Image (spheres, rainbow, N blue to C red):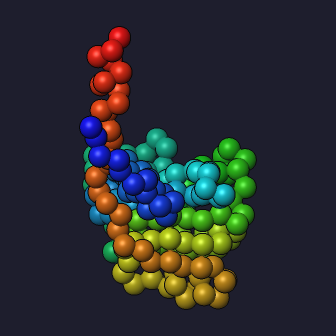
Amino acid sequence: MSKIKKRPAWDQYFLKMAMLVSERATCPRMHCGCVLVRDRQILSTGYNGSIPGDDHCEDAGCLVVDNHCVRTIHAEMNAILQCSSHGVNTKDSTAYVTNMPCTNCAKALIAAGIKEIVIFSDYHDTMAEEFFVKAGVKLRRLEMPETTIEYDLSNYSSAKKKE
């Protein structure tokens, strides 16, 4: 008999999704993931990656200017751009991000109408928090969610045996 697992809270669920999305990142300097959510529905996802058709940092190396890799588009920008390309409105949504957004991403999130940012890891040298306060965007810092996925096959296995 399998032990019943407690379902994750919504915040944990979406932060864990952001962690999974970050695995697609192509810049080794930082793997970041972002999930845009409204009314508990995922609008889009984004990760740090190169522009379409360009080399990836993991293949060609990072293109560093002023201690930032400029080859990649950040996770938050990619999530916003995905909404834009599909005609999805981001107003009043929440961004679940693995790391504190950089200053430019913070400004983009504010301009896109995101009302809340949820993170579990800080980022260095950013004015993001100051901009969020000025714009009235709520910032919540939570603990990093579990890094394991609880996937239970026990019911499937017993159903297969009965066939």
Res 162 → quadrant = top left
* Position of residue 112 measured from the top left corner of the image (x, y, whole percent): 68, 66
Can residue 70 be seen in the rendering of this structure?
no
Frontmost residue, 65 versus 47: 47
* Position of residue 22 measured from the top left corner of the image (x, y, whole percent): 38, 54
Res 8 → quadrant = bottom left
Classify the position of the C terminus by image quarter. top left
Q: Is residue 129 left or right of residue 92?
A: left
How many numbered discs?
0
Q: Which residue is found at the position 30% from the left and 32% from the top?
A: 154
Q: Which residue is found at the position 47% from the left and 61% from the top?
A: 9
* Position of residue 130 measured from the top left corner of the image (x, y, whole percent): 55, 88
Classify the position of the N terminus by image quarter. top left
Give the answer, above or below, for where 14 lies relative to 111: above
Give the answer, above or below, for where 135 lies relative to 41: below
* Position of residue 122 measured from the top left corner of the image (x, y, whole percent): 38, 77
Can residue 151 be seen in the rendering of this structure?
yes
Give the farthest residue toward the front: 1
Q: Is residue 64 left or right of residue 18?
A: left
Q: Which residue is found at the position 66% from the left and 83% from the top?
A: 136
Q: Which residue is found at the position 44% from the left and 77% from the top?
A: 141
